[in-house]
Image (tube, rainbow, N blue to C red):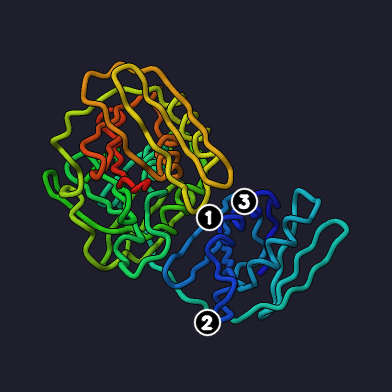
Amino acid sequence: MKVTFNRSALAEALGLMTSIVPSRTPKPILKCVRIAVAGKEMRIYATNLELGLEYLISEVDVEQEGEVVVEADRLAAIIRESIEDVLVLESIDTTCEIRGADSHFKVYGQDPKQYPRMPSFGSGSGDLTIGLDSLQAGITQSLFATAKESSRYAINGVLWEAKGKKLMLVATDGRRLAKCRVDLHHTVGEGAERKVIVPAKTMALIEKLGKREKETVAVKFVDNQVLLSCANVVISSNLVEGNFPKYEDIIPGDYDKKLTLSTDAALSGVRRAALLTSEESKGVKLSLTADALVFSGSSPEAGAAEVSMPVEYGGEPIEIGFNPQFLIDALRVIQAPDFQMELGQPDRPGVLKSGNDFLYVLMPINLG
């Protein structure tokens, strides 16, 4: 195999690849990427057996077709540190050589025949089609609420609930729940409903594709896998097995304490009130009256903070405590200048809403 390619194009591809290549594995070949060249194309593959990535680089100069398997981190470091715009990659058996104007690297690889093969997206538009920018916005508004470590595997991912021309993304860690709705361009089977749980790592990889204006993502569901094709990238991922919680039962629908707040002002208020909290007393209290909402936080060893913002509110006064970081996480992803807050009793969850497309449910904490 021998191919001449643009260094920055391969560097971009390897930046994505190294995010899924395992650093520790009993199978050393999984630390590698497979590079295959044919025609005028270079295709790079990476997998950890649960999540796979295929990246196409076109307009390369192929002198000899073939493939090579080489350790991802080593190759990425060489490409990153090289100073030329154009490099030559050549392989003989399992040895990979990279040449620049003043450099020559020889890297020992592995047998390409031993590298795991990944499913191909194939032809056709897929089961769903969605704008990449819409999907990434939905991921931003849901992924943060997934469980980081849990024996309940179903909440380690994000629920995709497709119905008609809408896709609902729902995530929870048991103490909070984020739900957002995005528009689909196309769906197979009008009126049909589909529910799957996509792993958090897969959702994070879609975010890392970066902004690609007007690009769409075609989605296929095959057995227990999801395949996502966008421009020159195909992502293949196992789905999370298990039953996602019945989130509709968690969302309160009978609250009478409702008010509209400035997103920036509320975010600033929570941040400042949390400055003097500690690990032991990490709650922030919200005290709501007819004309003011006061955020307060304190700890015995640090002191106390109080931040007030004017509001128009016609309900009963209430005091309720929340984890400030959980509030901050939600307020950061609200795109609108203001949002709606709904409260029940101090021992019931709070609800944040932004338009019809974003909803966040947050369990209160006891401030003692």
Q: Amino acid at mark 3?
A: Glu
Percent x, y of residue 334: 39, 32
Which one is earlier in the sequence, the residue at label 3 or at label 1?
3
Quarter of image, res 315: top left
Name the disc covering residue 114, or none: 2
* Alpha-carbon span between mark 2 and mark 3: 25 Å
Which residue is at the front of the view, 333 or 288? 288
Which residue is at the front of the view, 166 or 233? 166
Q: Up-down: is 125 above or below 30?
A: above
Name the disc covering residue 56, or none: 1
Mark 2 or mark 3, which is nearer to you?
3
Question: Dot 1 surroundings within 10 Å: few (below 14), some, or many (20 or more)?
Answer: many
Name the disc covering residue 119, or none: none
Percent x, y of residue 286: 37, 33
Q: Is residue 136 visible?
A: no
- For residue 189, side relative to residue 217 (left or right): left
Residue at the limit of the structure toward the right, as seen here: 102
What element does badge 2 sit on? helix
Q: Residue at x 53, y 46 (%)?
A: 300
Which residue is at the front of the view, 141 or 225? 141
Mark 1 and mark 3 in contact (Cβ < 8 Å)?
Answer: no
Percent x, y of residue 175: 32, 52
- Residue that numbered label 3 is attached to: 12
